[in-house]
Image (cartoon, rainbow, N blue to C red):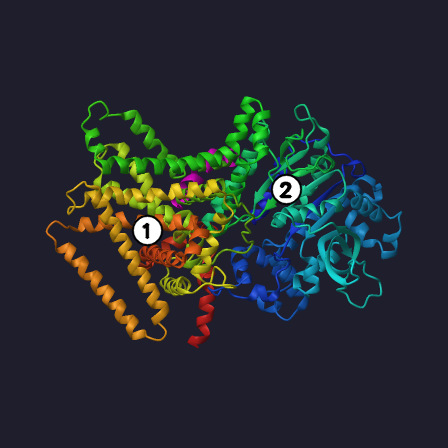
Amino acid sequence: MDVPSNLEARRRLSFFANSLFMDMPVAPKVRNMISFSVLTPYYNEDVLFSKDALDKPNEDGVSIRFYLQKIFPDEWNNFLERLGHSNEEELIGDPDSEDKLRHWASYRGQTLTKTVRGMMYYREALELQAFLDNAKDDELVKGYKQAADSNTEEHLRNERSIVAQCQAVADMKFTYVVSCQQYGIQKRSNDARAHDILRLMTTYPSLRVSYIDEVEEPRYAETEKVRDNVSYYSVLVKAVPKSADASDRDQNLDQVIYRIKLPGHAILGEGKPENQNHAIIFTRGEGLQTIDMNQDNYMEEAFKMRNLLQEFLVKHGVRTPTILGLREHIFTGSVSSLAWFMSNQETSFVTIGQRLLANPLKVRFHYGHPDVFDRLFHLTRGGFNSTLRGGNVTHHEYIQVGKGRDVGLNQISLFEAKIANGNGEQTMSRDIYRLGHRFDFFRMLSCYFTTVGFYFNTLLTVLIVYVFLYGRLYLVLSGLERKLTTNKAIMKNNPLQVALASQSFVQIGFLMALPMIMEIGLERGFRSAFTDFVLMQLQLASVFFTFSLGTKTHYYGRTLLHGGAQYRPTGRGFVVFHAKFAENYRLYSRSHFVKGVELLILLVVYEIFGESYRSSLAFVLITISMWFMVGTWLFAPFLFNPSGFEWQKIVDDWTDWSKWISNRGGIGVSADKSWESWWEKDQEHLLSSGIRGIIMEILLASRFFIYQFGLVYHLSITNSKSFLVYGISWLVIFAGLIVMKGVSYCKRSLSNNYQLAFRLIKGLIFITFLSILITIIAQPHMTVKDVIVCILALMPTGWGMILIAQALRPYLRRTGFWSSVRTLAQYYEMIMGLLLFTPVAFLAWFPFVSEFQTRMLFNQAFSRGLQISRILGGGQKKDKSPRNK
């Protein structure tokens, strides 16, 4: 038995064969089937990889072509064999071969060319099925391909030609519209992407492209003066049919089919949904499938589209469906461990998760791409919530489309931030409120726990840690814990200890893996599921899911407080590159690093002064899970960063970080070039927040003052419990702020013209500070523990003052204190960056750490025999070899 050696070919054949035994409606003839359209939104992503883009190396010296050759070695060899070449060098110089190379690479990326090719399989499948419906016996014996090849162009134009009839039927039943929002601008600017889109329309003549055209038109006012006014048009174009005597074989001309004037700008809200909304009028038929730009389709699955559309005529429950959900295959999970985790998570969500939501819970809504809508139902009712308008949503497992997912930690975090923001907006929306009131009790609970309830429970899971530690902090610093430990009535409260310890399994991400285990068990058997679970834990899946817990919590909570949810582009590129330290810091500073340092301080204080539960298993479980969460939130971005522990990368990262943190901001300076610009941009959500959000932000920031109030009374030099001690601690803080303000003023006034005087002032301040510190330590009652306690008491207070100042930003700008707040915040950012950078740099000294990280990150590649080390370092070796010569 001939079995394909390619793993993807095996998977596709296996799924197609298994799907034929599933329950599906009988397919009608093509002429009697439900007509449908496919709609894909596109903005500025890659259409077709250019030759320069394929050969351009990244910062590690790795090009896209080199990457794809190592990731798909068997497919690369097959490609060379199809072209009749024995090696890569023979491709160079042949325009036709280089063009096919561009397509080969684009079909393995997340490009528009790949998506269009996949969706146009629908038309090819319908042509073939129409041929099988209408062909005579002798034509069936010859086959469709021979019939198409034997027909001349004049014969194809003949309406009686079987091929012409099949193409006409396919065009009546299928329409594909790509909504390229910027296509008009790209054409006028002679953008290469516009030429590639034109080429797609020429390759697939039935493809239609819509875009928003902006035209400056003169208008005459009452004063008879001409005024330029911008008019907006929604335009649909197609490729001009090639003439027989055309001299240019790559004739690229488009022809306007419809041009509809709009009352104003089409982009009123988020760009992506509005890009689809303006193009819906150009779709035809009774069904509408929404396809994202990073999706793919397969020829064998396109054959089953007739069966799927018949589901609109079958009652599921008491009503026929208005949205048909489809299964997705994640095709980006074959290399890195992160891609594997995300692939398994998404696979469980789009299979067992969607199946359960649709039946029996009946709470599956519009998941997104690639759902098939009852087009007439939604066009006549408007709005996005099909269920509120009497719709019925189902899910079907016998057909699938491909889906590309994010494969790097930064991409994954942006995606999860986008989803968490959306759920935060849903929590406050009228639609969820109305659904909750109209559902029955059990359906209401199903809706809650499978939508906003999941994120709300995630938020509660993290809040439990804060409540527990701050409660312990109060008990420890107030002295109540010592008294409670002597109370025999509550000394051995085992049920409470077990309840507190059980949450550790949630915090370290074990429960997040359960749906994946169930889906893998149902698909491939529970032995394979258990093996994959063990492998995932060895590749630190718990670290990944615990880190994701922090992402969901932060962005969901921020949206509840301040709103401001927005679409976040995550990128579609190949992610086997090293993210710089400054980039990781910008992305995770507020969501993970600040919270991780706060929990670290709480745990350190509890470790220093806490006494209860020290010998119990509950104490061990509780504290270990929290320490694990702290370590994950602080160092997971560096652990999952390729080449994150290579010494040369560490040196480059420190140089880049130092430049970024010290650069001045201003108008036109982007956030990735200056810390000041990033810091200002990071507070934009506070500017649009309401008064309640500002008050809540101030109240939450006030928690940082607890440390100072409690810890100053535990110093060895403070025997008094008087409020005067607390007041003196505030004098110390204000003195430090005044000194910092003076240094800042001297820096602005003296650093340019009087550098020597400025350096003398800084030296005197440093010597004075060092003398005071030595004098205090030299006191008989001052210990090293007291120095640590002072730092733990005063540092959080300064951070709390910064957070309150940010909430009151409009008022502080008028008083002139805003520059001082910015300077203080910059010092804190430097300290936190140094705290994070030092352990990473220390571990980079040991070569085995980098090797372990590479093996852990790319275990899937190693198991498939891929040379991932050549991908990470191959380009560098190429660069070094000429120098050695």
| Picture disc at residue 550 | none
- Residue 845 in view in this figure: no
Please tell me whether residue 824 is drawn above or below residue 707 in the rendered image. below
Please tell me whether residue 51 is drawn above or below residue 45 in the rendered image. below
> What percent of the width, then of the height, locates residue 470?
31, 38
- Residue 86 in view in this figure: yes
The foreground one among 189 and 167 is 189
Crowd tier of the residue under label 1, counting other residues whose Cα lies within 10 Å: few below 14, some 14–19, many 20 or above: some
Give the spatial CA distance, label 1 vs label 2: 49 Å
Crowd tier of the residue under label 2, counting other residues whose Cα lies within 10 Å: few below 14, some 14–19, many 20 or above: many
The structure residue drawn at horizontal position 34% and vertical position 65%, both measured from the top left corner, is 745
The structure residue drawn at horizontal position 78% and vertical position 42%, both measured from the top left corner, is 173
Q: Residue furthest front?
A: 223
626 relative position to 382: left or right: left
Q: Secondary structure at mark 1?
A: helix
Q: Residue furthest left?
A: 780
User: Is residue 534 in the magenta section?
Assistant: yes
Q: Quadrant of the C terminus?
A: bottom left
User: Can you identify the residue that label 1 sits on?
Assistant: 798
The structure residue drawn at horizontal position 36% and vertical position 64%, both measured from the top left corner, is 651
User: Is residue 844 in the magenta section?
Assistant: no
The foreground one among 674 and 411 is 674
Residue type at mark 2: give it. Pro
> What percent of the width, then of the height, locates residue 765?
24, 64
Magenta segment boundaries in residue numbering: 521-541
User: Can you identify the residue that label 2 sits on?
Assistant: 370
